[in-house]
Image: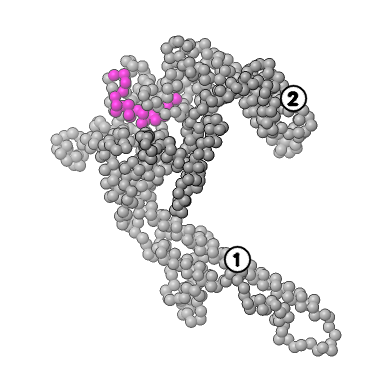
Amino acid sequence: MAGWASGPLGVVQAADREIARLTAVRARAIAEFAASRPASADRQPGEPGAMSAERRAARPEVLAGVSEWAVPELSIALSISKPAAGRELERAMTLVHRLPATLDALESGLLHPGHLFPLLERVAVVADDGMRAELERDVLAWVAARAGTRHLTTPPQLADKVRRMGLGRDPKQEAADLVAALRARGAWVRTDRRPGMAVLEALLTAPEAQAVIDALGRYADALDDDPADTRTRGQKMADVLLDLVLRPGESQLPPVQAQLTLVAGVRTLLGGNAPGDVGGEPVPAEMVRALARALGLLSDAPATPEPTPDTAPSTASPVAAPAVPWDPTGLPDDSWPEHARADFDRWEAEIDARAMAGVWGGEDDPPPEVQQRWWDEEARRNAHQHPDPEEPDHDRADHAADPREDDDRDEAEPDSATPHPPAAPAEGVRAAARTAAEQAGLALLELDRALNRASAAAGRAWLDERADDRAAQARGGHLIDIAATDLDALRAATVQRRAELAALLDRTAGGALADRPRIAVIDELTGTLLALTDARELRRRSHCGRPACIRKPENCQHDLTGRPGLGPPPPTDGHRPAAALDRYLRARDSRCRFPGCRRPVARGGELDHNTPAPHGPTSAHNMTGFCTGDHRGKHQAPGWTYDLTPDGTLTVTTPSGLAAATTPPPY
């Protein structure tokens, strides 16, 4: 290393060294925990419910003797996902059992945690114990030699050195690694940080990946050069990929049909900003509506605004326009009446003050078209008042051409006989002063022009924002977003939107829909799913059942608390839940209920009885959704307990005594 700094930087170095030491301590402690969870406690191959041969073969070699349930226990202890816990366990076991010298170097301060990656990736994978120990020794000696001569060793430098030193030492292992990498090929999706977006990833060989990218680029370049097509090359490549994979009727092959689960609240479909859910991932409201329109659930026609006192445009303005005619290309002159000039000056001063202060958007502001006209007239007047300094000014040029014609030209000529100092220096000083004054004046003029341009730009930006606000008000979106309940949102929606929503809920299966749309009845405070129903069921349950109320449900004023339809479906007699209960449970849990797990509940099963059947009912209060792996763990992991309360809270307790609780995700 370069040495020890003084002051705050020295504190940083000391902290980093302590972090490296504690990283080694942490790795040894995790390996000790793994040793207390042997694989011999799991169900062995051949026993019912044991780990499959494929999964067993896919586990890292260093974890072969560790129970498969050590990973979820570590994930709860560290509050991380199970994949992250698996990586932590594998890394600790690798450092302790395959790279002990590296762990010692980390603890002594020769290495820091950033150096571990190249050693784990390039040295730990060497199968032969002797070759691995020799390579590790050579690499650490190289790092120590550089540290002794004050040469820095960054992680990229170490990675390059390890790569060069490791190649060719074990050709058989390198070939086996290549085969293993080929077997790991695949494609998957991960959520992107931008709302409504996801990243599609594929692990391919380097030539295959380059060929795919090149082909997509060639397809994109072959598209017609349409001036109206503003897509970038990357956007075209993404669209080509979708066309080639999904084949929407563009080839002789049958189109691929994808199945998506779209969850959209009343407010979202009515035009509000509440987000929706597609495939378990939150997406913006506009994307939900676009997908609903593409599926034929919503019409493309915009809602016709209904004039209300809240949305009616106001014509009053605290900034009144001049009440007298005036020339838009000039400024008021002496021919203007005094009161007209005063009104104009007050109007212009207030416009500039509000633009510079960013104070816009009052309820009584004039209509956008009036303000746009003012800004255009202001811009034309500024252009006339302050010409472009780059254009030639002949008067100024002529004046600068003869510096002797200055403000002293009217003074009497001095007597030629009177001695005087040479005139050139004085004239040069006056010329330089005039030039500096002219340059300062031009700079002030340009500054004034820039301020006026900024004022006009601020005004136009405010007008655009007001236009967006008025469009949102026309849709009723702002009223929908501020509604306290969904019923208030329905009342705030336009008649057209309400009719469209009613028609959507009345539709049955057909076209691109796999099932008729359902209505999610949720608790307004907690977001908990109370019922999953449809329009016909709600109409059936919207009255008390008496003959008079059946004939005219709108007249029913009786207590409907005991009526079914606004709660979970009833229990099922058999072991497997009926269709309505199955649909409700998957909608309620959405994802695996094991603490920290984000996998979706499997389609074909994995709805677990907390109290095993037949001792426990097949009901919403006794069932939980899991992914396949965590469902196995619930029944097979030794020492684990699961407790489900009637409100859906699941508490999981590990053999170490750690307890973690989960509740159904809110809507």
Residue drawn 40% across the image and 43% down it: 287
Residue drawn 67% across the image and 78% down it: 399
Is 110 placed left or right of 418 in the picture?
left
Please identify the quadrant where the C terminus is shown: top left
> What residue type is disc 2 on?
Ala
Figure quadrant of residue 92:
top right
**Helix, strand or loop at mark 2:** helix
Labels 1 and 2: the sequence-earlier one: 2
Magenta range is 574-594
Please identify the quadrant where the N terminus is shown: top right
Residue 477 coordinates in the image, percent (x, y): 37, 49
Quick one: 215 or 424, which is closer to the camera? 215
Residue 664 coordinates in the image, percent (x, y): 40, 30
Quick one: 402 or 312, which is closer to the camera? 402
The residue that mark 1 highlights is 447
Vertical position of residue 475 compared to residue 315: above or below = above
Figure quadrant of residue 528:
top left
Residue 141 numbered mark, or none: 2
Is 315 placed left or right of 25 in the picture?
left
